[in-house]
Amino acid sequence: MSNLDYKFDQMMNPLLKALKELGGSGTNEEINLKVAQSLKIPQNQLEILHSPGKGTMTELEYRLMWTRTYLKSYGLIENSERGVWSLTSEGIKAGIVNEKEVVRWVREKMKKEKTTIDELPNGTETVKQLTWQEKLLEVVSAMTPAAFEKLSQRILRESGFIQVDVTGRSGDGGIDGFGILRLNGLLSFRVIFQCKKWKNPVRANTVRDFRGAMIGRADKGLIITTSHFTQDAKTEANRAGATAIDLIDGDDLAMMLKNLKLGVKTEIIPVENVIIDPSWFSRFEE
């Protein structure tokens, strides 16, 4: 049982307020951060995972996913194909909504459409949207650290890096490799990366230590993990006046592997079916 203080319906008005403050639209990350700040949710609650050991989605992200689902069904928000959420014309005009009325209306609509929802005692609801991500992360998490570094090397090469070297050395401030990223055939950036095959979240001190090790050695830093980053880690990664560090968490990693078709293929039959090939990942163990 999680200890997050707010149920999904209690975050409806904070989410609408967040979108208005963001100029009428926002990404999931922007919205989640705004809502967390508005409700003053403590750090320890922000780090609660929805399914520990089975993915990187936090309980807050999970409940806000349902908050968005209900508000979308109610006609107050909508999302684009690129995952950007925005207020509808009705959402722009809406003041404070009655959360219970929204829940009642949406559930009546679902009954008419013969859609079922299994409600849990804590006021959240079951969802199976991350099934393939969870399966993929289980495969990747079973790899050895050295194999995960090789996998990361392959991902970077497929993503536009023209040179990627894995150091494989310890005692180098957590640096696992160096790469050169070429943009549009014109600009090149030297990037230092770190691979974290972890189940526990990556915290701010890890980001700070990594930045200290890369000072004067690269233009940018990159941390790739199978887990997730705490909000403090994200803030530290983008701290003003410091070298920027890009962060790739488990969900980002899964989506990159899917988009790059590395060990993953997608069938449309007629809905999307993501197929994972565990044997493909075993090549990095050699």
Image (tube, rainbow, N blue to C red):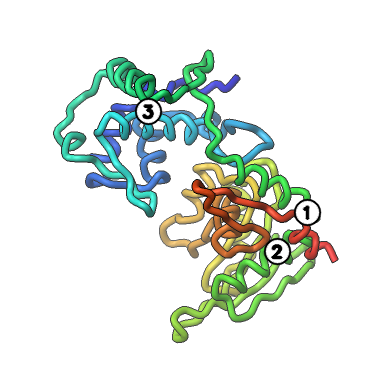
Q: Gap between marks 2 and 3, in whole Å?
A: 39 Å
Eye-nearest disc, 2 or 3: 2
Quarter of the figure with the N terminus: top right
Q: Nearer the viewer, residue 231 or 13?
A: 13
Q: Position of residue 278 (x, y in %)?
A: 75, 54
Q: Secondary structure at mark 1?
A: loop
Q: Which residue is mark 3?
A: 39
Kind of residue indicated by mark 1: Met
Q: Is residue 267 above or below residue 168?
A: above
Pointers 2 and 3 in contact (CB under 8 A)? no
- Name the residue: 51% across, 16% down: 122
Q: Position of residue 267 (x, y in %)?
A: 57, 54
Could you say which disc has been placed on residue 143 in the image? 1
Q: Nearer the viewer, residue 200 or 28?
A: 28
Q: Position of residue 53 (x, y in %)?
A: 69, 36
Can you name the residue that lies furthest to the bottom here? 186
Q: Is residue 77 above or below residue 209?
A: above
- The answer to which of marks 2 and 3 sits earlier in the sequence is 3
- Name the residue: 50% across, 81% down: 188
- Name the residue: 36% across, 41% down: 31
Q: Quadrant of residue 87?
A: top left
Can you name the residue that lies furthest to the front here? 269
Pointers 3 and 1 in contact (CB under 8 A)? no
- The answer to which of marks 3 and 1 sits earlier in the sequence is 3
Q: Gap between marks 3 and 1, in whole Å?
A: 39 Å
Q: Secondary structure at mark 2?
A: helix
Q: Is residue 210 above or below residue 33?
A: below
- The answer to which of marks 2 and 1 sits earlier in the sequence is 1
Q: Which residue is mark 2?
A: 151
Pointers 2 and 1 in contact (CB under 8 A)? yes
Q: Quadrant of residue 157?
A: bottom right
Q: Is residue 123 left or right of residue 47?
A: left
